Amino acid sequence: ELLESGGGLVQPGGSLRLSCAASGFTFSDFAMTWVRQRPGKGLEWVSTISSSGGITYYADSVKGRFTLSRDNSKNTLYLQMSSLTVGDTAIYYCAKDSGVPAAYYFMDVWGKGTTVTVSS
Amino acid sequence: ELTQPPSVSVSPGQTARITCSGDALPNQYVYWYQHKAGQAPVLVISKDRERPSGIPERFSGSTSGTTVTLTITGVQAEDEADYYCQSSDNTGTSLFVFGTGTKVTVL
C-alpha cells in the first residue's frame, strides 16, 4: 500500500514537501515514481528514484525545482517541491516500480494521491 | 507521444476497444491503467497483452505495428473509467510516457 500526504494550498513561488509511506513490500528493493494529474488533464510522469536512492530522474517541467529522495529505513518517499507555479497544481500520485523485467518499465502499485493547489 | 481517442462509449455487454498509437511502439512494451476519479490507478494489462492477477478476463490487449489496443469484452458498468497506455520513453527526455487518456462511458 502507498499513502501520500503533504498536499495543500501554497502560493506561487512557495514550497511544499510531499511524502509517500509504503507498506506491504520491501521498500528498499524497488524504484519509486511520482506521477501527477493536472486538472482536466491526463497522467504525467514527474520523477523517479532508484531503489537505493542514488539515481534520480526528472521531467523537464520540474527539473531544478523538485527534488526526489527516499528514506529506506522509514519506508518513505519524499518529493520536495519549490518555486511552485500555478501549472504545478495537480493530484500527485506515488507509484511503486514493478521491477519486472527490470526497473523503469512500469508501475504496479499506486497510491490514491494528494492534491497540491498553487494559487494566490 | 502516445495518442488515444478522447472517449469511447459502449452499452453494457458490448465490446470496447481503446487504441494507443505511437511510432516507437513496435520496439516498446505497453502497459494499460484503469483510473477512476478519487482512486488509485490500477494496472489492467502488462507487456502489451498480459493480464495481472486479479484482473477480469474481459480485459485483453493486442498489438499491430504502431498501434496497441485494449479490449474490454462484455463491458460492465464498473468498467466506466479513464484508461491510459504507458510505455518507456526512448527519446531520452523522460523515463515514462503516458497516452493522452480515453474516457470509457458505459451507456
Image (cartoon, coloured by chain):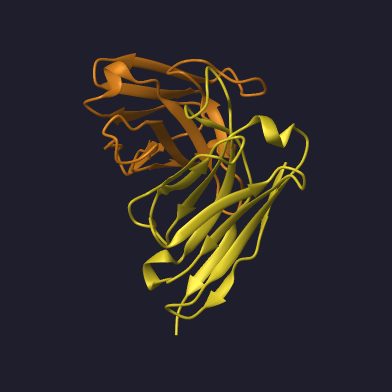
Any part of residue B4 in sight: yes
Q: Position of residue A110 (x, y in %)?
A: 61, 41
Residue furthest out toward the left? B23
Residue sitting nearer the eye, A3 or B82: A3
Residue sitting nearer the eye, A114 or A11: A11
Any part of residue B107 in sight: no
Chain A as rendered: colour: yellow
Residue sitting nearer the eye, A55 or A15: A55
Residue furthest out toward the front? A54
Q: Determine whether A91 is above or below A35 in the image.
A: below
Q: In the rendered view of the protein, which quadrant contains the N terminus of chain A?
A: top right
> What residue appears at the point 56 percent right and 20 percent down from the top-left corner?
A100
**A61 with respect to B59 (left or right):** left
Q: Position of residue B68 (x, y in %)?
A: 33, 22
**B6 with respect to A54 (left or right):** left
Q: Determine whether B8 is above or below A60 in the image.
A: above
**A21 with respect to B18 (left or right):** right
Residue sitting nearer the eye, A118 or A51: A51
Quadrant position of residue A61: bottom left
Q: In the rendered view of the protein, which quadrant contains the C terminus of chain A?
A: bottom left
> What residue appears at the point 54 percent right and 28 percent down from the top-left corner?
B44
Quadrant position of residue B3: top left
Q: Position of residue A22 (x, y in %)?
A: 72, 44
Chain identifier, orange in the render: B
